[in-house]
Image (cartoon, grey):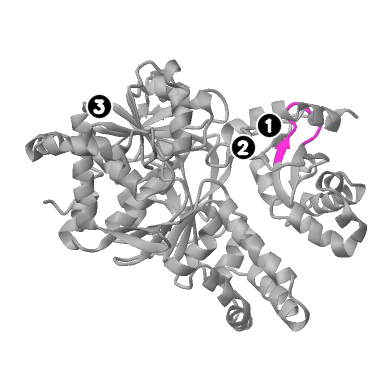
Amino acid sequence: MSTVATRVFDLAQLQYDIAPNFPMFSFKKDNEWVKISNTEFIEQVNKTSKGLIAIGVQPGEKVALISENRVEWNILDFAIQQIGAVVVAIYPNISTSDYSYIFNHAEIKNCIVSSKKLYTKILAIQDDCPQLNSIFSLDKEEGLNHWQDFVAEGQTIPDATLNLLRNGIEPDTLASIIYTSGTTGNPKGVMLSHKNLLADTLSSEYSFPVERGDRALSFLPVCHAYERVFQYVYMYKGLTIFFAQSMDTIGDDFKSVKPHIFSAVPRVLEKVYEKIMATGEKLTGVKRKLFFWSLRIGEQYKLEGRSWWYDFQLKIARKLVFSKWREALGGDIKGIASGSAALQERLIRLYMAAGIPIYEGYGLTEAGPCIAVNCYRRGMKIGTVGLPLIHIEIKLAADGEILTKGENNMIGYYKNPEATAEVLKDGWLYTGDIGQWVDGKFLKIIDRKKEMFKTSGGKYIVPQQIESKLVESSFIEQAMVLGEGRKFPAALIVPNYNNLLEWSKNAVPSLSALTRLDFLNSPELKQKIESELSRINKNFGNWEQIKKFAILPEEMTVESGELTPTLKMKRKIILQKYEREIEEIYNI
């Protein structure tokens, strides 16, 4: 066996050759952590591959995989790949219409889901997907086809048949199609080969401070390229991947797993911070003063050029307050990889001050997905997404658009040569994002090229920059900046109800007796948001400042159709949904 992986599923064999009995995965069952060794994993992958062959799955055939994170997902991922079939990894929480589109577009014949709920959902669209033959469930329930049924059929398939298929797979063979949940129009199927995924895995692994035997906690959806490639990185480096039970149990999972690393999106890190703040708000006396003094120290944190006096104060803050932050994450954390969207600089400084390294990065599914990261080996810069990954080139076009080149770049969009030609030109992938270089080498993301807009006065507005500042306020949960073709920029704001409720207990006690809706519509709350906007607006030029706003009573979610599964705002849908509120803003 070569010591170099050339196909994604080779990663399991590499680990088997080094440490056959080392646990590759661990998951909670009956309140106990169950471990799956490298040997057991490969045995289950091979049995599953034979089962897929037995039910007629052919090389090049697309197999849908719809499940939350669990070891069966990873078994099926490798089992499908090593017979030359293509994994179509789909989010469990997308709309029925998106399922129908993807199934028909990818010509899905076999689908594997995690639960009865998803089984029923896919069964309901089977009439609209005439090519769909079989649905299998990972959970064993009466009346459902169970995935072990086809695995059992594979007992008749000889090893030679599987070996022949596996040996015929080349690095350029299509491994997976990931349908990106675009903010407009139908999702596009990103085609990623074994070479694409492995190139990104090997470029990414260089940048993170973990070593063989460390523990990783996984809770972001593995169907997304971001978490998926991180799991491949963990496999390559010989870590044990622990699956969090759910987002509700994540605090307990941190404490019992004591992870050295995990990947997160900004919303997760914001939620952790909000829980810490809620605890701090309940403190009294000296403890309360120490807590907020430590926060002020943390907010001033910088990577270099700190004075001895600052470091002395930081040492005290870490011992008295920030050590509890680390304990909340298990106590052994070496780093958190943050991606998908920009994380507030203030939070990065606070986490770093607490001795919790944040490695913020950037990428997109079409690039396999990671292309830049703040790297513990080569350098970090707070407020940027770091340096280009090794073996990956990045340059900026004349208009600031980020272009990238490397073996990680996708093959193209499935059945969509026109869209492929728009973004792949002369080996460069046109990302659609606007960037700039900081200190000549660190990449900073400014905005999505298509999301920048002009006011009626001809001034350019970069919404993401403003939105990032708005949500730094502890009283603003979500914000979307708008104003294309209008006289001035405005914002749709989802207030942070819990934090405002705490604020009102001292500021305006009578508000706490109101219903949630009356509370959010109260003049006092609007005045509080206005004061926050007035403070934040000082960061921007007059033409960029938010002049008016509308308060939205409910959080924007994936389920409501306002966010993509990666928590990006579907701006067109949001504009349509809140058309009345927007017109009231501009009805002067």
Which SS class for mark 1?
helix
Which image quadrant: the C terminus? top right
Q: Which residues are magenta?
A: 480-489
Name the residue at 38% across, 15% down: 130
413 within the magenta span: no
Magenta region includes residue 486: yes
Q: Which residue is mark 1?
A: 574
Residue 162, image x, y percentages = 13, 37
- Residue at coordinates 58% horizontally, 78% vertically from top-left? 318
Is disc 2 placed on a helix, strand or loop? loop
Helix, strand or loop at disc 3? loop
For this rendering, which residue is in front, 249 or 270?
249
Q: Is residue 378 left or right of residue 574?
A: left
Give the x, y percent position of residue 139.
Answer: 38, 42
Q: Amino acid at mark 1?
A: Ile
Residue 304 can be seen in this image: no
- Are circles 1 and 2 on residues that touch, CB within 8 Å? yes
The kind of residue on which mark 3 rests is Gly
Distance of mark 1 from mark 3, alpha carbons? 38 Å
Q: Picture quarter containing residue 377?
A: bottom left
Q: Residue at x 64, y 66 (%)?
A: 276
Other-residue count near label 3 (Cα within 10 Å), few / some / many at <14 / 14–19 / ≥20: some
Residue that numbered label 2 is attached to: 569
Amino acid type, residue under disc 2 in the picture: Met
Instruction: Find the distance from the CA under tag 3 to the CA under tag 2.
Output: 34 Å
- Would you say the residues marked 3 and 2 are in contact, meaning their CB atoms lie under 8 Å apart? no
